[in-house]
Image (cartoon, helix red, strand yellow):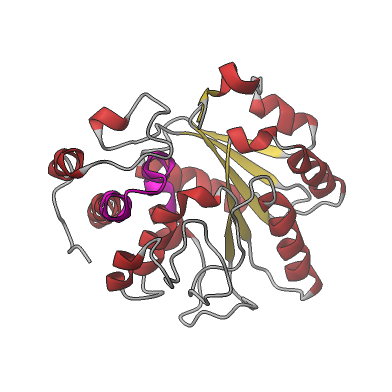
């Protein structure tokens, strides 16, 4: 995992510099999901060398909580979908790297627009059904925020997936217990996500430390082995918002706030360059 640790550090640097450059964006959740995204794209998913929107004969990923686009863009560029120099255009006029991922700019790696929360399950289920109809033995992956689950559409889709045995689907919940207005329990307490998904007929796995590369890799591998056995799979992944930057951790305040130049320097000093900035 040594090389992956270097990639994680570089992705953190990308995130921090991208949002600082335009004084806009969502660093908190992006930093919290960095390890997951690196493992998913560099170790787990079966991806074709050339990107196509139809995604035939490859695994697909859908980002539901689209506001954490900085980590998505960084990982896509670091594994070759587009040149890392394009990261410097994040959230700028005419950029393909919009604040929330969109499709009409044609950015390789992005398959859906995901600015509106709560829709990722529905899209992922549709893609999984398509794979089944095409008799492809590929897996659909998706990532969702825990606060996002307060949207009712999620639970209709979650119920549909189990009732229709959508078993080529692995959905991961970024369970950092925080959203833009504060702690989940103070905004709208979700109770036990594990029990909720079990009640809806899903196979439930838990990652106790969603910022540990080895644990993420182990659980995603376990989830893959549970596919095609009659049930959709969900991973409840406990993460730390703002992970890797000490003054961003333990608070919801960095959900959608960019670091200023002084704060950026402090954050980058905690994450020394490992591969090369864009």
Please tell me which residue lies in front, 258 or 13: 258
Is residue 228 visible in this depiction of the protein?
A: no
Instruction: Report whether 233 appears left or right of 49.
Output: right
Q: Residue 228's spot in the image, x, y percent? A: 72, 56
- State the predominant SS element of the stretch in magenta: helix
> The C terminus is located in which quarter?
bottom left
* Residue under the point 58% across and 74% down: 104
Q: Is residue 210 above or below residue 7?
A: above
* Residue under the point 81% across and 72% down: 133
Q: In this view, does 90 lie above or below 269?
A: below
Q: What stretch is highlighted in magenta?
A: 14-37
Q: Is residue 61 above or below residue 238?
A: below
* Residue under the point 13% across and 49% down: 272
Q: Residue 170's spot in the image, x, y percent? A: 63, 51
Q: Which residue lies furthest to the right in this view?
A: 163
Instruction: Report whether 256 appears left or right of 119.
Output: left
Q: Which residue lies furthest to the front in this view?
A: 93
Is residue 210 visible in this depiction of the protein?
A: yes
Marks counted in the figure total: 0
Is residue 52 found inside the magenta-colored segment of the image?
Answer: no
Q: Quadrant of residue 140?
A: bottom right
Please tell me which residue lies in front, 104 or 131: 104
């Amino acid at each position: 995992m040594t090389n992956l640790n270097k990639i994680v550090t570089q992705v953190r640097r990308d995130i921090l510099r991208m949002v600082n450059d335009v004084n806009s964006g969502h660093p908190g959740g992006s930093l919290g999901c960095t390890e997951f995204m690196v493992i998913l794209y560099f170790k787990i998913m079966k991806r074709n060398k050339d990107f196509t929107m139809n995604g035939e004969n490859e695994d697909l990923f859908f980002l539901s909580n689209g506001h954490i686009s900085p980590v998505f863009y960084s990982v896509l560029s670091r594994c070759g979908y587009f040149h890392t120099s394009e990261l410097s255009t994040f959230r700028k006029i005419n950029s393909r790297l919009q604040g929330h991922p969109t499709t009409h700019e044609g950015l390789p790696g992005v398959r859906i627009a995901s600015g509106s929360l709560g829709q990722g399950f529905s899209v992922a289920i549709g893609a999984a059904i398509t794979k089944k109809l095409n008799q492809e033995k590929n897996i659909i992956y998706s990532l969702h925020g825990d606060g996002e689950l307060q949207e009712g559409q999620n639970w209709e889709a979650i119920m549909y997936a189990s009732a229709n045995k959508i078993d080529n689907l692995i959905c991961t919940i970024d369970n950092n217990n925080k959203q833009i207005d504060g702690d989940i329990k103070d905004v709208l307490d979700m109770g036990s996500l594990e029990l909720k998904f079990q009640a809806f007929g899903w196979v439930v796995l838990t990652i106790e430390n969603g910022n540990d590369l080895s644990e993420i890799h182990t659980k995603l591998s376990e989830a893959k082995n549970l596919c095609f056995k009659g049930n959709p799979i969900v991973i409840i992944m406990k993460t730390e918002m703002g992970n890797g930057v000490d003054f961003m951790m333990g608070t919801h305040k960095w959900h959608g706030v960019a670091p200023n130049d002084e704060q950026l320097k402090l954050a980058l000093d905690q994450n020394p360059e490992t591969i090369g900035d864009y």
